[in-house]
Image (cartoon, coloured by chain):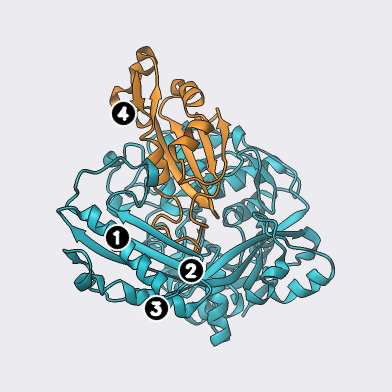
Chain colours: A orange, B cyan
Amino acid sequence: MKIPLSQIAHARSGDKGDTSNIGIIAYEPEFYPMLVREVTPEKVATFFDGFCKGKVERFELPNLGALNFLLHETLGGGGTFSLRIDAQGKTLGAALLRMEIDVEANEIAKTNHRR
Amino acid sequence: MIRIANGQGFWGDWLEAPVRLVEQGPLNYLTLDYLAEVTMSILQKQKQKDPSKGYATDFPTLIGRIKDAVLAKNIRVIANAGGVNPVECARAVHKLAPELKVAVIHGDNVLDKLDEWLRAGHAMKNLDTGEELSTIRENILSANAYIGAFPVAEALATGAQVIIAGRCTDTALALAPMLYEFGWKQDDWNHLAAGTVAGHIIECGAQATGGNCQADWQSIPDLANIGYPIVEAEPDGTFVVTKHEGTGGRVNIDSVKEQLLYELGDPKNYITPDCVADFSTIQVAADGPNRVKVSGIEGRERTPFIKLSISHSAGWKSTGTLVYSYPDALSKAKAANRIIRQRLSDLGLHFDEIHTEYFGVNACHGISAPPVADPAEVMLRIGVRGDSRTAVDRFTREIVPLVLNGPPTATGFGDGRPAVHEVVAYWPALVPRELIETHVEVVE
């Protein structure tokens, strides 16, 4: 079944120059393997196709049940260079939470109390 | 155990936060982070106009407000408020609080050394692009080295109650009191990494205590009275993240994890002047209401380089907006965008970039935003950037006329033509560590 990523994870995003950093954090430790399996750099690059003009890097943090993404060339030059309203990519974590992922029903039995 | 708080995540953060931190509960150290990458260039310009300026002017005012509590509770204040003029900042503090001993840290401002270093073969290439510094040498506005925690600890050793740094790292503000209190050594890599992680968690103020927290945000209590973060640090490198009792917000595993991930690059290589912290070793655990215990942190030897933050002018920009209402708001905004671009082209104006966003439709999320069916209103947001101030200035005259000579139902032009801003770009570079010499001065 397909669910939005927001059902199993929360996020915070920020900037490093023209690179957007998006942290995706599993609500429960047992959701982390789903993040690793479903939220691949390739899918993230496709999700932000054209918006992210550079490569997408992914780093795993199993200790925090989290993934850290670096989206290069994504913030219109970054900092004061950028003409974007969200020049720091503050909202891109929330954007990524809308991405649909494929899960088995039994994998997400615990998700009802979260959004 | 020592309690270290952060009461300012950036210059412009909540003025009441540091006042409440010193008044609403126990505290040993109050840290304040005032500097973003481009702040230095603004301060450098202010100093050029007036040699007594060039620091975070909010800071002396704050000290004036909190000096009684600071003295009564023996709280020590550490701030990178000095900008490019820490001595003048200290003098301003002294004027408002003569009873407080103030120390400043020198050595981060390297603007006068760049040419000597270039001649000596230090290329200072742009870390992101690899470009040579010579390509922007004439346009450089400021150049500062990121100072680590050891010079700040040295300043604490003078007994000063207020420590003023220039461009020291955000994480050094919190690590320094741990070095000073616990006697951690230059090569205690795990401890240095632990203090660095503590600094990372509190450096953005309330982002650790429920501010900008996406997890269950609607249930976070009393954001109006949000408590700013406090680290209870132990000599063994473990610490608890918390806030004063009775304050709003929430410290839990979710809020701490979100902040740990904030502005993070490669988690195994979090590089500071003090050490390389490994974020993949961090363990977090609930420790009662509004308390999260952090432990297990490992670090590695610092690199032989110090990072420079160089800023340079890079042209001009301006962004204008117009609001179109239902019906067909998006179509009208798109038509207006085409008309503006055609008029700019017909005027023979050239820009490095023209950027259009449809606010209410896709401005924040771009391609990933879902389609919106005929919204009540859409804001056209169009900006230009280029080398010619004249061209950018001419662009600012092309927005408001659309109200009368473009598609129907345009409004929201009350502020008239948009302002023109100088673009100040950030140039990160490395130099060998030996080139950076710091010293501490007690300002009487």
B345 to the left or right of B399: right
> Which is more N-terminal, label 3 or label 2?
2
Q: Disc 3 designates what residue?
A: B394
Which amino acid lies under the numbered mark 4 shown in the image of this protein?
A: Arg
Q: How many marks?
A: 4
Say which residue appears at 44% left-offset and 23% top-offset.
A31
Q: Is residue B429 above or below residue B240?
A: below
User: Label 1's element?
Assistant: strand
Quadrant showing the C terminus of chain B: bottom right
- Circle nearer the viewer, 4 or 3: 3
- Residue A57 shows in the view: yes
**Residue A80, numbered label:** none
Q: Would you name the residue on which mark 1 appears? A: B380
Query: Can you identify the residue that label 2 sits on?
Result: B351
Q: In the picture, which quadrant includes the N terminus of chain B?
A: top right
Q: Amino acid at mark 1?
A: Leu
Nearest to N terminus: mark 3 or mark 1: 1
> Residue A114, labelled with which disc?
4
